[in-house]
């Protein structure tokens, strides 16, 4: 009898978030599921890890399915690290992160705890996918997402992914009938125009509250932002090698090494 795939499920919204519960439900149809997720929301944590404090991982009883669950005091990246090194019976065949409440398209991938968890698994050579729904509400409806999550996860289990490649998947906030399909995309060139709202607390001490506006600078029709605006699920293959390969040769022409001027 063929052994079922071992699937690690994690997220950044916390182990009780509706998005991860939807993801667990789908993964239970595909393999043996272990859940290691933060015990509290960790959105925007990026690839932070815990270095200067204790890390706790508590096994949970009375779960809502056959999965094994651990609640972790650390960041999303911590969850993946401790899952692989301590909590899982073997290296997982797949890691899925999400379903995030809100977009992780374009520049958001840099800040995302959801995607950092998936990337951490990718660093370990585990095929990994981050899933996000374009709805920030805690009460978002994830029913349409489940269809696409299962399709994409099954394909990754079947085909695998190249070393270092992780899939960033964003899903429109639409009913399944209104979603036109899946587009393979590149990351849009976009950024946040940020402002800091200066305020005072009741004691009169000044503090700042981050605000901002998302600006899409990319008019291409092959981007994740275009796909989402046009009711497609956007899948972007990303990798953690941040080398700007196209600039290496030019950089080598710079006079960076001081010349030895002999007297």
Image (tube, rainbow, N blue to C red):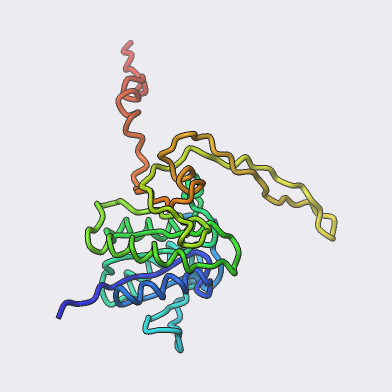
| Residue depicted at 51% across the width and 46% down the height | 229
Identify whether 223 is placed above or below 26: above
- Furthest-top residue in this view: 263
- Furthest-left residue in this view: 1
Q: Is residue 205 left or right of residue 19?
A: right
Identify whether 185 is placed above or below 70: above
Point out the image quarter for the C terminus: top left
Q: Residue 206: where, in percent of width, then height?
A: 79, 51
| Residue depicted at 34% across the width and 54% down the height | 166
- Comparing 65 with 56, the one in front is 65
Task: Say if residue 47 shows up in the picture.
Answer: no
| Residue depicted at 48% across the width and 51% down the height | 231
| Residue depicted at 52% across the width and 70% down the height | 14
Q: Residue 51: where, in percent of width, then height?
A: 46, 62
Q: Residue 152: where, in percent of width, then height?
A: 33, 60
Q: Is residue 114 left or right of residue 29?
A: right
Q: Is residue 243 left or right of residue 38?
A: left
- Comparing 64 with 86, the one in front is 64
């Amino acid at each position: 009898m063929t052994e079922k795939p071992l699937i690690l499920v994690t997220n950044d919204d916390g182990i009780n978030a509706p998005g991860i519960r939807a993801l667990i439900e789908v993964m239970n149809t595909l393999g043996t599921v272990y859940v290691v997720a933060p015990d509290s929301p960790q959105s925007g944590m990026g690839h932070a890890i815990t270095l200067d404090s204790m890390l706790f991982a508590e096994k949970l009883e009375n779960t809502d399915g056959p999965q094994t669950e651990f609640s972790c005091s650390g960041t999303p990246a911590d969850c993946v690290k401790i899952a692989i090194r301590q909590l899982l019976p073997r290296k997982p065949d797949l890691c899925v992160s999400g379903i995030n409440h809100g977009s992780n398209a374009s520049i958001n991938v840099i800040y995302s705890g959801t995607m950092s968890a998936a990337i951490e698994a990718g660093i370990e050579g585990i095929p990994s996918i981050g899933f996000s729904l374009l709805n920030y509400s805690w009460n978002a409806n994830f029913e349409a997402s489940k269809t696409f999550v299962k399709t994409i996860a099954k394909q990754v289990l079947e085909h695998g992914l190249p070393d270092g490649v992780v899939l960033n998947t964003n899903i429109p906030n639409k009913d399944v009938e209104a979603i036109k399909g899946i587009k393979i995309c590149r990351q849009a060139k976009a950024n946040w125009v940020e402002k800091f709202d200066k305020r005072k607390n009741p004691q009169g001490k000044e503090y700042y509250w981050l605000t901002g506006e998302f600006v899409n600078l990319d008019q291409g029709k092959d981007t994740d932002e275009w796909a989402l605006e046009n009711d497609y699920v956007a899948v972007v293959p990303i990798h953690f090698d941040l080398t700007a390969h196209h600039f290496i040769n030019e950089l080598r022409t710079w006079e960076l090494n001081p010349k030895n001027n002999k007297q």
